Structures are given as C-alpha cells and as structure tokens.
Image (tube, rainbow, N blue to C red):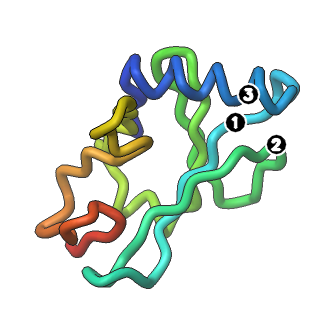
Amino acid sequence: MLFVAESAKERIALLKKEEKLADDFFIRVSVTSGGCSGLTYQMDFDNESQPNDQIFEDNGVKVVTDLKSFLYLCNTTLEFSGGLDGKGFYFNNPNASRECGCGESFAV
C-alpha cells in the first residue's frame, strides 16, 4: 500500500485545480536510478494506466506506481511540508536504509 498524508492531499488538490486537470488524473510515483544515494523518486500527474501498474487510493487520492517501483515504495507515505523551511513533497519511506542530506535520493 502507498499512503497519502492530509498535507499532501491538500497540496495535490490545489495543484490539480491550478493546472485545470480533469478528475481522471492521478499521481504517478516511480523510483529510478540516480541521486547521491543511488535511487531517486519521481512524481507526476498522469491519466493513463499501464499494464503492470499497482493502483492505490488513500485519503481520497489515487496513487499509481509500476511493479518494480512498488518493491521500493511499499508502505511509503507521501507527505508535503510548506513554508520557508518546507521540503515540498517528500516520501516517508520505511524501506530506505539511508537518505541523502537533501532528501532527494535514498538507498535500500
């Protein structure tokens, strides 16, 4: 399962409204090679499912990921922190053994 914190839900709703996205758009999350710790998160709006997608809905937000990425993301919570010291969107990933200082990449 992938989870969505209330803070992320609110920000996603605001972004969808600002970008005038239809209701069928969802959040696509993936993990790719890169960053100083080896793996990095990617997140975008999408409205087309792929054959091996894993589909979750939490807190009223639909989150989709490919099967390979899900192995790294299982039980992860998408969160949002705003303000001057805020991180923006970030992932609270219990599978990560370490994260880089900027929080952009991780290792398992």
- Residue at image location 65% in from the left, 21% down from the top: 14
* Residue, disc 3: 16
Hey, which quadrant is residue 25 in on the image?
Answer: top right
Rendered view: 49 above or below 60: below
Q: 44 left or right of 41?
A: right
Residue 89 at x, y percent in the picture: 43, 42
Q: Amino acid at mark 1?
A: Phe
Going by the picture, which residue comes out furthest to the left?
A: 97
* Residue, disc 2: 47
- Residue at image location 76% in from the left, 21% down from the top: 17
* Residue, disc 1: 26
Residue 12 at x, y percent in the picture: 59, 28
Specify few, some or many for label 3: CA neighbours under 10 Å numbering under 14, 14-19, or 20 or more: some
Q: Earlier in the sequence, mark 1 or mark 2?
A: 1
Hey, which quadrant is residue 64 in on the image?
Answer: top right
How far is the residue under mark 1 from the one under mark 3?
9 Å
